[in-house]
Amino acid sequence: MSNPEDPARSDRPASQGTASQNSAAPSWVDEVLGASRSAPAPAVAPTPPPPPAASPAPTVAPASPQPTATSGWPEDLRIPEPAARAPAPAPAAPTAYADDDWVSRATGAQAKNPSLPTGPAVTPSPVRSELDSLGDTARHALQQVQTSLGSSDVSQKKLIAGLLGIILGSLGVHKFYLGMTTPGLIMLGVNVGVWVLALLLGLVTLGVGLIVTIPLASLVSGAIGLLGLVEGILYLTKSDADFQHDYVVGKKSWL
């Protein structure tokens, strides 16, 4: 029987031989061998997987605009511009004549667009009717009546003013009748005032002064009466037109 310790024994000389060889090798060999043993094995870089095949890019639908919350105040304060008007359609080309326009067919398409001759405008003479002539006649008759009434009124006024001047001219009544108040008041005041003054002087002088004052008052009153008489005669002798121009319209005060 063999001894199990024989392999150990058989291995021991081999290892010893190797150790002896190693000890016999140079020192740098030991260093290289020790470094190679101590250095870790290099890690193998993993192989990247192959890139996937290019697929068509998916089409993305456009996002619809999100409704914005309306605020209390408008953001755009500009005045809206009026929308541009659409251009008017071109007028249809005029035809020579319509199917139902028998006038155009008969006259050579001149009924719808007649050509008028150009020239100086001729104003037609006014046509007088019988009513116009009757109106003119009535108008002339009315004017004559008004003229006759005016002349008769002036004649009547002239006659009355002349008689008042002759009869009551010293009191200035004819002046009041013609509307001349100031000359009438002057004549009336002078005539009446002279007599009042004459009586007062007679009372102061106990009647002695009346011998002088009464003739003087009579003289002044007679002069005023004479002026009224002359004016009354002038009124009667003047024509109606002159009397109206001088005394009715012109208000001539004296003579």
Image (cartoon, rainbow, N blue to C red):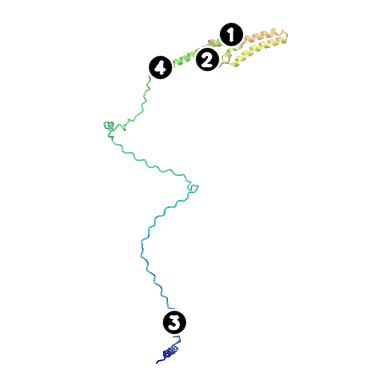
Q: Which residue is mark 2?
A: 244
> Residue at image x 54%, y 15%?
248
Q: Residue furthest bottom?
A: 1
| Residue 217 visible within the image | yes
Left or right for 76, reference 233: left
* Numbered disc in front, either 4 or 2: 4
Left or right for 179, reference 75: right
At label 2, which amino acid type do we have?
Gln
The span from disc 2 to disc 3 (Cα, nearest Å) is 166 Å
* Numbered disc in front, either 2 or 3: 3
Q: Which residue is mark 4?
A: 134
Q: Position of residue 61 (x, y in %)?
A: 39, 55
Above or below, 56 against 151 in this view is below
Badge 1: few (under 14), some or many (20 or more) residues near its Cα, within 10 Å?
some
Above or below, 106 against 52 in this view is above
Badge 4: few (under 14), some or many (20 or more) residues near its Cα, within 10 Å?
few
Sequence-wise first label, 3 or 1: 3
Q: Quadrant of residue 116?
A: top left
The span from disc 3 to disc 1 (Cα, nearest Å) is 182 Å
The span from disc 4 to disc 2 (Cα, nearest Å) is 33 Å
At label 4, which amino acid type do we have?
Leu
Q: Which residue is mark 1?
A: 167
Label placed on residue 37: 3
Sequence-wise first label, 2 or 3: 3
The span from disc 2 to disc 1 (Cα, nearest Å) is 22 Å
